[in-house]
Amino acid sequence: MIANYQNSPQSVQLPGKLAKVLLNNYDRLKISGEILNLEGYQSVLLDMEKNT
């Protein structure tokens, strides 16, 4: 679970590759490579790919 509790956008470095978005309180999700860009007050629950 990653949440932005601020009204301004925030960027987060993901620990790997995204497999699936399980929950999102917004209609869209902005991801560039392994950088997640959250809008203000956006929260997401992500399923990440397993390392092999």
Image (spheres, helix red, strand yellow):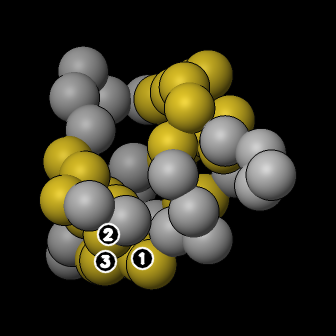
Image coordinates of residue 46 in percent, x first then y, are 62, 39
Q: CA distance from mark 1 to mark 2?
A: 6 Å
What residue is shown with label 3?
Answer: 11
What residue is shown with label 1?
Answer: 12
Q: Is residue 7 above or below residue 48?
A: below
Q: Is residue 32 above or below residue 49?
A: below
User: Given this view, does label 3 or label 2 mark the residue nearer the observer?
Assistant: 2
- Between 21 and 16, the residue placed more toward the observer is 16
Q: Please give the count of numbered marks on the rendered protein.
A: 3
Q: Which mark is residue 35?
A: 2
The amino acid type, in three-letter code, at marker 3 is Ser
Q: Rate crowding at label 2 as few (under 14), some (14 to 19) or many (20 or more) other CA atoms within 10 Å.
A: some
The amino acid type, in three-letter code, at marker 2 is Ile
Taking the image as shown, residue 17 lies to the left or right of residue 40, namely: right
The amino acid type, in three-letter code, at marker 1 is Val
Q: CA distance from mark 3 to mark 2?
A: 7 Å
